[in-house]
Image (tube, rainbow, N blue to C red):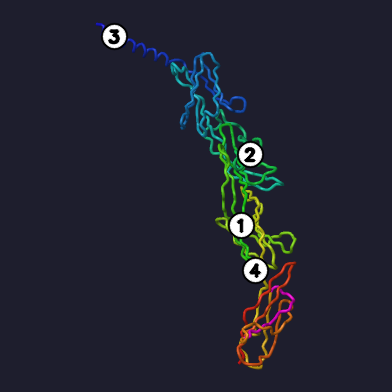
Amino acid sequence: MVGMRRVLAVALAVVAGAASLTACASDPPPTEVAVAWAPKGRAAVLVTWKDNGQPNRITIEGVLSESPSYVKYIAAGQPNQWEIPTSAFPPDGNYKVAVGTGTSQGGVTSKLTKSPVFDTDGPVRPSAATVAKQGRGVLVRWSVPLAPQDFTPNDPLDVKGKKTQRYVPMIGRPGQMLKVIGPATTSNRQVIKSVKPPYAFQLRTQNEWSTRIGGQVLGLTSSINAAVPRLAQFSVPIRVRGRVILHQVGCELDAPCTSKRATPAGVPVVVLTQVAPGSRWTPAARGSTTAGGYYDIAVPTGGSRPYKITVPENTKGGTQTGTSTSKPAYTKSIVRIASAGFANGNTATAKGSTVTVSVAVKPAMNTTVMLQAWNRQTRRWANSKALPMRNGVAALAFKAAQPGDFVYRFVIPGAMMFGRPIDGTTTAQLQLHVR
C-alpha cells in the first residue's frame, strides 16, 4: 500500500511539472526588437525591445552563418536595452539579435523575437599601393577594389555614404612593432615627410566591424659587390659583373618586424667612372639585375680610370630601394692595335721589290714607334727603325734586299690621357718571305 502511494505521488508530480512548463513556455514574448548603432563611435550595437517588465535573455543568431556563443540576461525591471560590443559579432556574416523572456536559472519561457537581418562585412582591403619620392620623403598612394555585393541592403546597421572605411598608416622597422604614424583618413594617399629604408609601410583599414591590413609598401636597403677587370684594351668594352642583395622588412601585427634577404631581377645598376683625377663621378653604363640578383654589364672603355658600381635610389611600384655602392676599382688601359702588317697582305715578295709595313692604333695618338726585327743569331729583337706616328698611324716602305724569312714587330710606347697613363704594347709577329 505504501508503494502504491509513492508511485501515485511521483505520477502527480510529473503531471504538475508538465503543467508548470507549459504555463512558463506560454509567457508573452518581447515585441519590437530593433538594432541600431550605439553612441560614441559605433563601438557597440544597441538592442531595444518592449515587454511587461519581464526578465530577458539576449542571443545572436547566424543567418547562413554559425551563431556565436553570446548570451546576456537582463533582470526584470531593468531598461529594455543592451549594448553588444562589435567584437561579439564574427566578421563577414549575416546575423539577427534574438530576445526572449527568461533567466539563467529558469531558462527561456517565451518564444524568441528577432531583429531584422544585418551583415557584419569588414572593410575592403587596399589591393595595391605605390610609392614615389617627394622631397625628403615619399608619397604613398593606394587603390581599393569595389566592395562585394551587399546581400542585406539597407539593413538597420548600414552606414550611409561612400567613405565608410578609414585607413590608419603604419610603419615597421626591423626589431620593432608596427607603429601608427598618422591619424585615420578616408583619403587614398599619405605623405611621409621623412623616411629612409629599411621600413615596411602598411595600412590598417578599418570600418565599424573589423580591421584588416593591406596596401603594403616596402623600403629596401641594398648591398652590391663587383668584379672589374684590371686591364682593358683601349675602346674595347669590359664586362663588369656582380650581385645585388636587397634587404626587406616583414611585419605582423602581433610580433616585431624582421629583416630578410631578396635577390629579385630588374633592380637598376649604374656603372660610374671618373674620367680625370679629381673629376666628378659620371655614368659610364647602365644595366639591371637578372634572376638571383646578378648583373653583367658591358662598359665602354677609354683611358685608364676607376670604376664603381651603384644601386641608385629608386622607386618602382610598391618598393623604394635605397642606394649602395661598391668600392672603386682601377682599370688600366692598354693601347689597342687596330691593324698591323704588310701592304696588300703580302707576306711573300721577290728580292729587290719594295714592301710597306704599317701599324694603326687606338687612341689615335702622335708619338714615335719602333720597328724591330728578330735576330736569329742573338735570338733577340733588334731595333730596325724609329718611325713617327701621326693620328695613330705609322708606316715604312723598304726594299727586300736579300731572300729569306724575316720576322718584324712594332713596339708602341705608352701615353697619357686625361692625366692618367695608358700602357704601351707590341704587335703580333709580322712574317715576311723574300724569294
Q: Name the residue under label 3.
A: 6
Distance in Å between CA atoms under marks 1 and 3? 98 Å
Amino acid type indicated by mark 1:
Asn
Q: Residue 318, how many percent across, how many down?
A: 61, 47
Q: Which of marks 4 and 3 is nearer the N terminus?
A: 3
Instruction: Give the alpha-carbon distance from disc 1 to disc 2, as whole Å.
Output: 35 Å
Relative vertical location of residue 205 with respect to residue 333 in this rendering, above or below? above
For label 2, the residue is: 169
Mark 1 or 3: in front is 1
Region of the chain picked out in magenta, as a range = 362-375
Q: Where is mark 1, residue-wise?
A: 225
Q: Distance between the residues labelled 4 and 2?
A: 52 Å
| Residue 232's disc number | 4
Badge 3 marks a residue whose secondary structure is helix
Depth check, front residue: 114 or 420? 420
Numbered marks: total: 4
